Image (cartoon, helix red, strand yellow):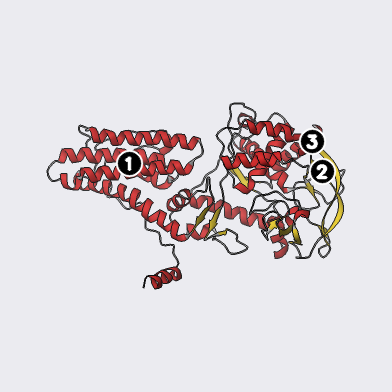
Amino acid sequence: MVSGSDVHGTPITVRAEAEGVEPQDIVDRYHSEFLANWRAVGISWDLYTSTGTDNHAEVTQDVFLQLLEHGFLEKKTSEMFYDQEAERFLPDRYVEGTCPHCGYEYARGDQCDNCGRTLDPEDLIDPRSKLSGATPVMRETEHYFLKLSDLQEPVAAWLETREGWRSHVLNWAKSFVSEGLHDRAITRDLDWGVPLPVDDLGAGKRIYVWFDAVIGYLSASKEWSKSAGAPEAWRLWWENPDAESYYFVGKDNIPFHAVMWPAMLVGYEGLNLPTNVPANQYITFKGGKVSASRGVGRPIGYYTERLEADALRYALASNLPEHNDTDITEAELERAINQELVATWGNLVNRVFNMSWKNFNAAIPEAGNLGASDRALLDKVDNALVEAGRQFERVELRAALRIMMDAAASTNAYLNEKEPWKTVRQDLAGTATTLHTALSAINGIKTGLYPFLPHTSQTIHEMLGQPGSVRDHGWVRTVVMPGVPLDKPEPLFRKAELVEAEDEEAVGATDA
């Protein structure tokens, strides 16, 4: 599992110029912030790097030279926007304007984030420079172009072989290719980016970010190999025909990961193309596309300060926009946490452990003789793990989460039917069987929830006296041992309070 910070993007240089600092200062600041955010929400990587390393530059230059040798790069003179006030050429993302397809006023020179169409800067209506706000003019400049037109046929044929892809991803990619792939510049007039491995364009040129960013997956794999002390291990993922690779992106990145990057890999030769590109649709916030510059949405740190990591992970996972755009509000995040996570799962764990601790000498009770309803519950949990596993393999994460939460709801229903809080007064052995069964069910459910709730799942694992970590035991429900001591349980989660005071006042006024 590798990824990294894309350090050559336009926002970095624009921010650096606005603050009067070097781009590397911006990179260092935000890369550190990204790492802190990953840690705060419990997301781990085999390697999280950046595209600013010497290793990445070497790998990018190798890809450039291989494509050049194979005849898929050529120099062309073309017209590009020039900012007369800033006295410099403008890379695609330095130009902003109105999308000619959907009318979105903040489309970039390479792509519209609203409708997802790829663009050329000259396509924009009322273009403006992000440096000065001035209207740019066209001037001639020479650059290297990736000959996508020569790669269209093999990419189209490869897309026809894709199975199990999300329909919106595959349809979009196929449609994009069928409209015709146009040769695309991979260098720009910049002084920030990966240097060219050839010098026939003259000074002031760099490899452009859209080309080098996707190479980051390959360069990160090679960096991981070196850091692991096995420099050739990356080949097991990139050259082994049995290896599978999954690219987790948002839908605005579908063209780059399902078309452009595969085209580059075809041209390079000998490396695996993506197995799947499970791109998510957009998340909007209170009806608007999240944008820091326009004040829509909040930074992740706002939520990590107010929510437990697993609660935030649950709220996000339960709203993943896997097939449709999803609108998020803080009221919905709060509802998901309080009415689903806390009320269904947290309450189940707390009451079963409490009853066991209180009535069976602070230890896991004996299993006794399981009846039909006991076995039926455990079968349901085991089947849920199997089905959730299938959903994970299809990259249907929301469905996997729902299956395991349904198993938790079934366990709650089982307890309501068995009523151990009543039977404990007349049938202690039967109550022990009920609670042991419920603890066994919880043990299985926590395994299925571990990818979503790693911290609290590990807590439950340890409460049940299970050795090691959850992942050590595999994707199965393991045996719960009677007699294992139980500490007095504490609630796993606290209720979320995200709705702002002014929102509460507004709701109160409406209710009144």
Q: What residue is disc 1 on?
A: 442
Residue 354: x percent and y percent?
A: 25, 49
Q: Is residue 91 visible?
A: no
> Residue flagged by tag 1: what amino acid is it?
Ile
Q: Between residues 288 and 62, which one lies in front from this camera angle?
A: 288
Above/below status of 80 relative to 399: below
Element assignment for label 1 = helix
Q: Residues within 10 Å of mark 1 (few under 14, many from 20)?
A: many
Q: Quadrant of the N terminus?
A: top right
Relative to 494, does residue 212 appear above or below in the rendering? above
Disc 2 or 1, which lies upstream in sequence?
2
What is the spatial separation of the Cα atoms under label 2 and label 1, in whole angstroms?
Answer: 59 Å
Q: Residue at x 41, y 54 (%)?
A: 336
Give the mark nearer the N terminus: 3 vs 2.
3
Quadrant in which residue 373 is drawn:
top left
From where the camera sits, is residue 70 visible?
Answer: yes
The image position of residue 423, as x and y in percent, is 16, 44
Residue 94 or residue 387, whichever sits in front: 387
Q: Which mark is residue 144?
A: 2
Q: Which residue type does callout 2 highlight?
A: Tyr
Residue 67: quadrant of the picture = top right
Measuring 36% from the left and 53% from the top, which residue is drawn there?
342
**Mark-to-mark CA distance, 1 and 3:** 56 Å
Which residue position holds label 3?
Answer: 72
Residue closest to the eye, 41 or 55: 41
Q: Which mark is residue 47?
A: none
Answer left or right for 392 relative to 168: left
